[in-house]
Amino acid sequence: MTEAGLSPVSEAMLALREQVIDAWCQAVRDTLCKAGSLPAPILLNTLPVFYERLARLLTPRYFHASGVDVAIIAQEHGGERARLSGYDTTTLIREYQLFRQVLFTMLHQGGIALTHEQRAAIDTSIDSAIRESVTAFALIQSALREQFIAALTHDLRTPLSTVSMAAHVIEQRAADPDIRKLAERISANAQRIEAMTRDLLDCMVFEGGERLPLNIEEFDLSLLAYEVAQQAMEQGNVKVQVEFESVVGHWCRASLQRALENLLGNAIKYRAPGTPIQLKVGCLGERVQLEVHNEGEPIPPEQMESIFQVYRRARRGKSAKDGWGVGLPYARRVAESHGGSIVVTSSVEEGTTFLLALPTDARPFSNAPVSG
């Protein structure tokens, strides 16, 4: 059925709708592996309505209103793809590109000649649809991921607590040293899982563009660093050489503890076997400097910045390390939230050093901008 008042070219385009859509469905299934198993109603999604609105664009009096409709339909398309398919953004963009190719090919084969302005109107609308769909797709995926992570971390806490307590009781009461050693391993791995769930929650903060909550108080950073170093040696069976001077200032203790744990954990993970970690805390003017150093394979120069991005970790040689790639981004966010910064140097000769520098009084800078 055609709509009264449409131009001849709009009506001609609508007459080809079923053929174009069938050809597009076949092209998508043949080209995109993630579309191959989608049921027909899910694959079609909003495409029939999208096609009809594109046809209306070729009637001048409908042009502006249809342009708005196309954007809204595209948003729904992206949202459905996020919820009901295994698509990624590349697949989403590619199916729009296939639609453009199929559409113009079949219009040509059907003898429908478009003016330069008409072709530009369709091109512009498809480009706009891609932008709107990808934006909606990303927003829905982010929301779904947050829901999943929140549910996962909530559900993990109770059994993790039970495992940790049971391992501690066995470690204290077992007479057999082998059983005590096994209980220690259970406890250590439970702590690793707990740390990874905290990292997942941090991912939600980073992706949402939220600021880290800071509870600034006065304390001696050297004492905090010493506590974290002792904990790392007990849990990681590694030597941490410490060099401290007392530095009392105003910072958020909890976030700095996490940041230092992440830096030490990273150093332990990538150190050369049998080598110690070096940890220094000192004061330079009105800034405190905290250094974590390890020997081992250097970070490739081209990855010096990417290691501070969420979900990214440096590839050093053939080593493959576990984790979410959140520890270093978290450390940077902590530094920036205190009005400070973090710098990394890495070479074969000198090893790898992370230098976290902060004002001794972070209270005036707690609302400082942070990088995304």
Image: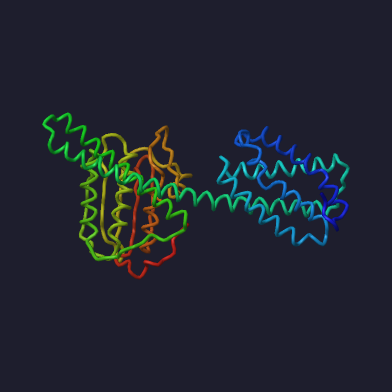
Residue 37: horizontal and vertical position, in percent? Answer: 61, 33
The quadrant holding residue 215 is bottom left
Residue 232: horizontal and vertical position, in percent? Answer: 24, 44
Relative to 68, is 14 above or below? above
Q: In this image, 172 relative to 256: left or right?
A: left
Say how many tags the image has.
Answer: 0
The quadrant holding residue 290 is bottom left
* Between 310 and 65, the one nearer to me in the picture: 65
* Between 107 and 234, the one nearer to me in the picture: 107
Figure colour scheme: rainbow
User: Residue shown at 29%/49% (left/top)?
Assistant: 261
The quadrant holding residue 274 is top left
Relative to 20, is 341 above or below? below
User: Residue shown at 28%/40% (left/top)?
Assistant: 190
Q: In this image, 215 relative to 86: left or right?
A: left
User: Residue shown at 77%/43% (left/top)?
Assistant: 103
Residue 230: horizontal and vertical position, in percent? Answer: 20, 47
* Between 237 and 54, the one nearer to me in the picture: 54
Residue 279: horizontal and vertical position, in percent? Answer: 26, 49
Check the image and name the residue furthest to the front. Answer: 1
User: Residue shown at 73%/54% (left/top)?
Assistant: 124
Check the image and name the residue furthest to the left. Answer: 175
